[in-house]
Amino acid sequence: MRAILYVIVCVSLWGLIPVVSKTGQIDLDNHQFLFWSSLISFLAYLPFFLFKRKSYGFIDFTKMVALGFLGTYLYYIFLYYGYSHAKGLEVLVLQYSWPLFIILLSVILLKEKLNLRRWISAFLGFLAVILIISHGNFKNIYLQSFKVDLIVIIAAIVFALFSVLSKNVSYDPYTLLTVYFLTATVFSFASMLIFSKFSFPTSRTLLPILINGIFVNGYSYLFWILALRFSEASFIAPFVFLTPVFSTIYLVLFFGERLSPIYGLSLSLIIISGLINQKR
């Protein structure tokens, strides 16, 4: 029961990503929003890092930085761009195509077998992506919409690559997350100066940044760790697919977005695809 409580809190926080992404970029772009959010997340984890004081070598920290670049910088810089330039539900469905790409990358990089269950899962995920890009009609693919959708799909591929490469990583989670968010802070600061400009949060973006930095990208991971400690991973993992459900509810409540039949069907296919792939 305790594990279920922890995981529900975790996924309900992860479900806020579309909300904080859209509201946090009212006066900031994706580089600026990611910098301030990552900085807050880094400061939130720093006390745990200092308290744990785990000792790792240069090669270990290099691996952590490389993974952090993929999972907490590159993924979010593309994802935040998508949420600031397209409808939240459209981005949400494409965002959760990452289980599809995990299957494909696992076959390529980890030489895992693509059995019938995974073929079905991959097909359903691919079908959902095609439906959302075409909006159910291939004549409706507009250049601007397709460009944003493609960036979000790249974000999903990046996160899938991050997940596959993280499979055999067993570092202390507090150290790992501290390094991840420090990496995201440094790289987003650099990209902010190169592709944008330095800008302080405004009164309208400060709250979303704090919520995102402390809870959504911050302490939510602690709830995930606690959930895994109180139950088996195979029991907890399927709960992740409640995240897009929470996100959909939030987008409808906060922004009044309309859940069209195509969005609903595509979202259902993504969730079913993930659940099929989780089943053993």
Image (tube, grey):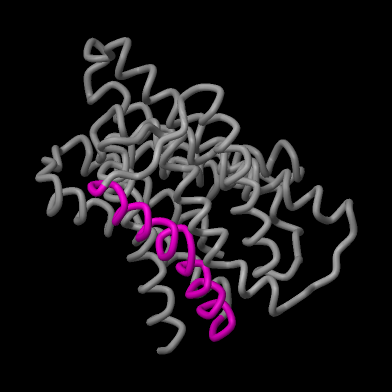
Horizontal arrangement in the rendering, residue 126 relative to residue 194 (left or right): left
212 is higher (above) or lower (below) than 50 = above
Q: How many marks?
A: 0
Query: Residue 63 at x, y = what percent?
Result: 79, 49
Residue at the spot x=34%, y=35% of the render? 28
Relative to 194, does residue 169 appear above or below in the rendering? below
Q: Which segment is the magenta one?
A: 203-231
Residue 225 is drawn in which quadrant? Answer: bottom right
**What is the quadrant of the N terminus in the image?**
bottom left
Percent x, y of residue 61:
80, 54
Q: Is residue 215 left or right of residue 119?
A: left
Inspect this view and state whether residue 127 appears.
no
Which quadrant would the C terminus be assigned to in this image? bottom right
Image height of 146 relative to 72, above or below: above
Residue 98 coordinates in the image, percent (x, y):
50, 43
**Res. 141 image quadrant:** top left
Front residue of 15 and 260: 15
Residue 54 painted magenta: no
Front-most of 252 and 136?
252
**Residue 125 shows in this picture:** yes
Depth check, front residue: 51 or 67: 51
Residue in view at x 45 percent, y 52 percent: 274
Q: Residue at left 27%, top 12%?
A: 142
Secondary structure mostly seen in magenta is helix
Q: Locate residue 2, reporting x and y percent.
A: 43, 88
Question: Is-magenta flag for residue 213?
Answer: yes
Q: Residue at x 65, y 42 (%)?
A: 69
Q: Residue furthest bottom?
A: 1
Q: Is residue 19 above or below residue 192?
A: below
